[in-house]
Amino acid sequence: MMNQKYSHKLQRFQELLVTTLLGDVPKIAFGPQLRRLLYRNLFTSMGKDVYIQHSVEFINTSAIELGDGVHIFKNVRLDAKGHPNNRIYLGNQVALERNVDIGCLEDTCIHIDDQTFIAPNVCIAGPGDIRIGKQCMIASHSGIYANNHNFADVSLPIKEQGTTRQGIVIEDDCWLGHGVTVLDGVTIGKGSVIGAGAVVNKDIPPYSIAVGIPAKVVKSRISKELIKINQR
């Protein structure tokens, strides 16, 4: 146990040392090239042609894997701390725009597959597992939260009642509009479009167009007919 704690502290010291020395080196000073060279030793694995901009924060890099051609822009935060089984995986050509915050809590796997784009100011958080498929587009200010607080007992503060964690799946080729919220236990089917500002609290079938709070399917991408919401 002591050796494990020491190992974690040493790893965190290495992360802070490297990111502090190189984290704010700008592009004009060959910052991305230096970061790509020296960050490689921090991660579990790191593919070729990875681009990491300045002012990025990584926590528990031994649980983070980066595929080929990953782009991570400034002020992104990847936090895999909290449990030895935590894992963050970014597939080939995944792009994380400015201020994206991805965080594990306990025994959490966050998997973002190839060629998916995450726009600025998106939050993705466990503790439930989260899987985002290939070629998805997540618009800015969206939130993907794989947990719910229990609140049935009014004699206890909500924060003391624990949480549930069912996990979230967003299948391939989905587009989430600006400010979409996806709640725990949801699967969004392949090829679906979620309108701006929607709150998704139930499964969405493949190739659906869903809007509203809570999100309801209004159209199928493989049908020309609108679905009447009041009949669902």
Image (spheres, rainbow, N blue to C red):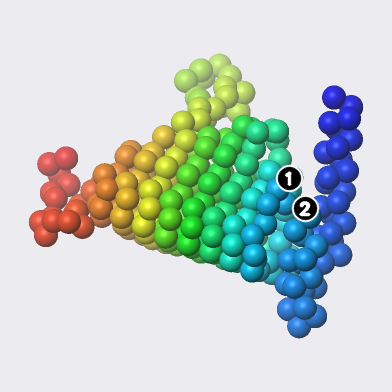
Q: Is residue 181 left or right of residue 163?
A: left
- Displayed quadrant of residue 103: top right
Callout count: 2
For badge 1, the amino acid type reads Ser
The residue to which callout 1 is attached is: 62
Residue linked to disc 2: 42
In the rendered view, does 121 fall on the left or right side of 51? left
Q: Determine whether 35 is above or below 158 in the image.
A: below
Discs 1, 2 touching: Cβ within 8 Å? yes
Q: Residue at x 85, y 24 (%)?
A: 1
Question: Residue 126: where, in percent of width, then height?
Answer: 56, 39
Query: Tag 2 or tag 1, which sits nearer the N-term?
Result: 2
Residue at the far front: name it.
48
Disc 1 residue crowd, few under 14, some 14–19, many 20+, Cα 10 Å: many
Seen from the viewer's position, the closer of residues 11 and 40 is: 40
Q: Quadrant of the C terminus?
A: top left
Q: Residue at x 57, y 22 (%)?
A: 161
Task: Say if residue 140 shows up in the picture.
Answer: no
What amino acid type should be assigned to the residue bearing mark 2?
Answer: Leu
What residue is shown at x 77% (from left), y 66% (from top)? Answer: 37
Q: CA distance from mark 1 to mark 2?
A: 6 Å
Indicate the secondary structure of the residue bearing disc 2: loop
Q: Is residue 164 visible?
A: yes
Alpha-carbon neighbours of circle 2 within 10 Å: few (<14), some, or many (≥20)? many
Q: Position of residue 217 (x, y in %)?
A: 23, 48
Local secondary structure at mark 1: helix
Q: Residue 153: horizontal and vertical position, in percent?
A: 51, 17
